[in-house]
Amino acid sequence: MTEGLTIGRWAPSPTGDLHLGNLRTALLAWLFARSAGGRLLWRFEDLDSAVRPQFYESQLRDVAAVGLDWDGEPIRQSNRIDVYLDAIANLRQRGLTYECFCTRREIAEAVVAPHGPSPEGAYPGTCRRLTRSQLSQRRGEGRPPAIRLRVDAPDTQHLELTVADRQLGSYTGIVDDFVIQRGDGTSAYNLAVVVDDAAQGVNQVVRGDDLLPSTPRQVHLARLLGLDPPECVHVPLVLGPQGRRLAKRDGAVTLADRLALGEAPLYVLNLLLTSLGLEPVTTVDDLPALAERFDPTALPTQPWVWTPVAPAM
């Protein structure tokens, strides 16, 4: 990695068409990277079973249509399975993992069990305490185990870690014995993203603030693997009219939807820019100049509530 060069990334999951909230976060990732004279990489986080082939191209096409570019060829997590397995093997050899046979229902019930409550969202450590005979029994039942990271915290199964966010300041969250490999053998998001960011030299991550709670886990894991965590920039989401995260239920929310209503890509781009308090552009060729004037400290700190409007004519 070039000394001092900002390297950001945009990492969507190809499970559907990008909606306005996705495009807005992509725009922000682009602005943060380009305003610093840096690079922006594209990574498809495609380990989800809901991935569909057609969305690789449609997502590339939509981002390009609103004037955003990226550096190099997009990579796919599905082509990097062996890299994740190597990282898991590293942790396993160091005694930092264990098998977990819990279902979601069992985890929910264990949270309120007599041995003591766990913080909201934290795994209560049920399978950490299995005896050898219990472990053998679970394996004999044929349920494929997930692999959890063993957090080294005295007398508990979690620790608290404070991380710095460029936009939101300090955030303290829980690091529990989180899953790094699912029961079907697929590497979990928190592991794959840490390994990939380091491998690609990413030192700046711009993403929705709904992912902030996962950041302490990722920072902790990066340190265990001897990797440098990137700078994090968590930005407000786009909400639908009902105050929930924008989704298909909210109507014509994708670029394809808006184009079908007669809106031009430039109109959609300017809609996103103005939602961020930025001036609209006459053409996408004006974006580099806009990036030079970009001031992250002036960005809104509250979600943008998108309300459907009549198609632009």
Image (tube, grey):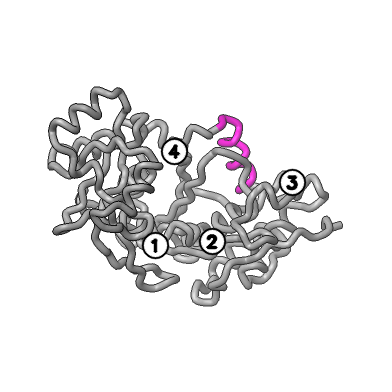
**Tag 4 or tag 2, which sits nearer the N-term?**
2
Q: Position of residue 305 (x, y in %)?
A: 66, 65
Q: Which amino acid does label 3 sit on?
A: Asp
Residue sitting farthest toward the right: 313
**Tag 2 or tag 1, which sits nearer the N-term?**
2
Q: Which amino acid does label 4 sit on?
A: Ile
Q: How far apart are marks 3 and 1 (CA)?
A: 31 Å
Camera-nearest label, 1 or 4: 1
Residue at position x 58%, y 62% from top?
A: 288
Q: Where is residue 32 in the image (x, y as percent from the top left)?
A: 48, 63
Q: Name the residue under label 4.
A: 75
Q: Mark 1 points at which residue?
A: 232
Does residue 105 lie above or below 292 as drawn?
A: above
Q: Position of residue 15 (x, y in %)?
A: 56, 38
Camera-nearest label, 1 or 2: 1
Element carrying mark 4: strand
Q: Distance between the residues labelled 2 and 4?
A: 20 Å
The magenta span reads: 52-63
Does residue 222 lie above or below 166 as drawn?
A: above
Magenta includes 60? yes
Q: Name the residue under label 2.
A: 28
Can you see residue 171?
yes
Q: What residue type is labelled 1?
A: Cys
